[in-house]
Image: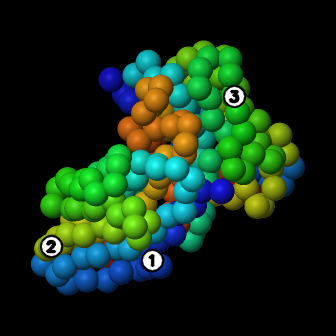
Amino acid sequence: NAGVTQTPKFRVLKTGQSMTLLCAQDMNHEYMYWYRQDPGMGLRLIHYSVGEGTTAKGEVPDGYNVSRLKKQNFLLGLESAAPSQTSVYFCASTLAGHPEAQYFGPGTRLTVL
Amino acid sequence: GDSVTQMEGPVTLSEEAFLTINCTYTATGYPSLFWYVQYPGEGLQLLLKATKADDKGSNKGFEATYRKETTSFHLEKGSVQVSDSAVYFCALSDRHGGKLIFGQGTTLQVKP
């Protein structure tokens, strides 16, 4: 039982490049979330999903897209990376109706030059 | 909208000192309240929670009481250890129960 895993762990991009971050969970959780963590700002919700095939915008969705084609996977895409997207990205998952019991992945540190 | 405000850090304490990290919130209705902890290089872990007014959440020697009258959920520990060094986040769940709103985090450093 691996819990929540994120790929990759580190990445450096140039401005304008694209990439996809992968989140996978093996706990059969319905809800999945993508956050970004920046110094002094806590965690801010980018997008989330309450089930396979459904996604919704969070607090800071601009510049990101997501897809949830399979229940266990939640992908975060950056179509044209900008330096303002330099951050640590965390994925989380939970059972429906239990937002407090979110299981977090180890994070992806992304630097955009 | 709903929001959470935490005291600014970093907080530096000696081992066995008393810890308080302040957290206040603004919310419509009656949210559930949480404290999460993030150890270096790791994701967040739920530390404790309280779901209604006057509830006290506790875990690993940490406590926090849901105070509706002062809209607060301060984290306390009577005697901190070096291993408690981490970033602590206060959070609330939104009205619909599907999302968490986090404070900015408070870094705690405990020195031997």
Residue B7 is tagged as 1
At 70% from the left edge and 33% from the top edge, which residue is drawn?
A56
Residue B45 on image: x %, y %: 35, 48
Badge 2 and badge 3 in a common chain: no
Q: Residue at x 35, y 64 (%)?
A: B67
Secondary structure of the residue carrying numbered label 2? loop
Residue tagged 2: B78
Crowding at mark 2 (Cα within 10 Å: few <14, some 14-19, many 20+): few
Residue B89 rendering spot, x and y as whole percentages: 43, 61
Q: How far apart are marks 2 and 3 (CA)?
A: 43 Å
Crowding near the residue tagged with mark 3, few <14, some 14–19, many ≥20 C-alpha atoms within 10 Å? some
At 20% across and 84% down in the image, what residue appears?
Answer: B14
Task: Identify which residue is drawn at 87% across, 49% down.
Answer: A16
Categorize mark 1 by other alpha carbons within 10 Å: few (<14), some (14-19), many (20+): some
Q: Is A55 situated left or right of B48 in this image?
A: right
**In the rendering, which numbered label is found on residue A55?**
3
**Rendering colour mode:** rainbow
Q: What residue type is labelled 3?
A: Thr
Between B61 and B82, the one nearer to me in the picture = B61
Going by the numbered disc 1, the residue's amino acid type is Met
Residue A65 visible to the viewer: yes
Name the spot of residue A36 as percent of width and height, x first. Answer: 61, 52
Q: Compute the Cα span from label 1 to label 2.
A: 18 Å
Callout 2–callout 3 Cβ contact below 8 Å: no
Q: Earlier in the sequence, mark 1 or mark 2?
A: 1
- Can residue A113 be seen here? no
